[in-house]
Amino acid sequence: MLILTFVVLLYLPASAQTLQGLAEIDTYVKLDPDVRFTFQVKETREGGDPTQAEIGPSLDFYVKPLVKLKGAAEFDLDDSKSRLLVLTIGYRYLPQANGVPGTNRLEPVATFNSPMKGRFLLTDRNRADLDWRAGSFSWRYRNRFQAQRKLRFRSYPPAPYVSAEFFYESQYRKWSDTALYAGCIFPIGRHVEFDPYYEHQNNTGRSPNQQLDQLGVILNLFFSAR
């Protein structure tokens, strides 16, 4: 059922105005205990931009372990959630159609994880999108707060979450976009996670405001080079 949902979203027309489907594949390769390589392919529509593809690699650096995080991130295939701080540097290319120059994006990210009572995990992600296209430069700052709780149904551990992300856009010189998410992570075996989610965006950068509703599925793949 999850695979069928992923395929449907992948081919859902991007021109839909009230509800869009977004698909994403993230491949993670652990290089050593504190360094991880990531390659991402996704569809995205953020910060008032049109729907577009985004592709590129990242390197994650695990800075500090925290014993209390092991319980909150237990049974999670993403071991970065067991670290207090993860620093990431990434590159993304966003191609454009009809001969329009694509965007080259540099993505520095700092992610903080904090355990809470009741086996909740609170994540605070701080990310910058530094964009170059056709000789021009623009940037946005994004701050995403997420609360996740690992459940147990017999031996199966799904992880529902809610999150809110706020965008500051240099071209508008203001906080111009808010995105609200609700989803659930479903692990399958030792290497695969499906993450279906719902997203609502309110973009105030242009007039009139844009209200976007999106359904997405993220396929996470985890491997180790060791």
Image (cartoon, rainbow, N blue to C red):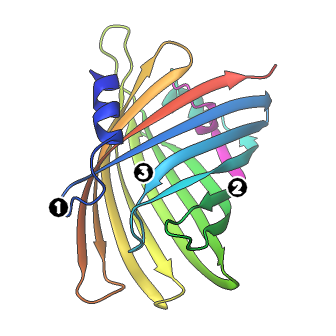
Secondary structure beneath dot 3 equals: strand
Q: Give the range drawn in magenta.
A: 76-89
Q: Nearer the viewer, residue 73 or 127?
A: 127
Residue at the spot x=42%, y=82% of the render? 175
Report which residue position mark 3 lands on: 146
Amino acid at the residue labelled 3: Gln
Q: Nearer the viewer, mark 2 or mark 1?
A: 1
CA distance for labels 2 and 1: 31 Å
Residue 101 lies left or right of residue 7; in this view the side is right
Quarter that holds the C terminus? top right
Query: Mark 1 or mark 2, which is nearer the start of the sequence?
Result: 1
- Most distant residue in the top direction: 154
Across and down, in percent, residue 121 comes to: 46, 41
Q: Nearer the viewer, mark 1 or mark 3?
A: 1
Query: Mark 3 or mark 1, which is nearer the start of the sequence?
Result: 1
CA distance for labels 1 and 3: 25 Å
Residue at the spot x=59%, y=44% of the render? 40
Across and down, in percent, residue 179 comes to: 34, 64
Report which residue position mark 2 lands on: 90
CA distance for labels 3 and 2: 21 Å
Across and down, in percent, residue 107 comes to: 66, 62
Give the answer, above or below, for where 138 lies relative to 131. Answer: below
Secondary structure beneath dot 2 equals: strand
Residue 174 lies left or right of residue 100; in this view the side is left
Q: In which image quadrant can residue 14 be found?
A: bottom left
Please say whether residue 160 is visible from this viewpoint.
no
Crowd tier of the residue under label 2, counting other residues whose Cα lies within 10 Å: few below 14, some 14–19, many 20 or above: some
Amino acid at the residue labelled 2: Gly
- In the drawing, what numbered circle is on residue 18? 1
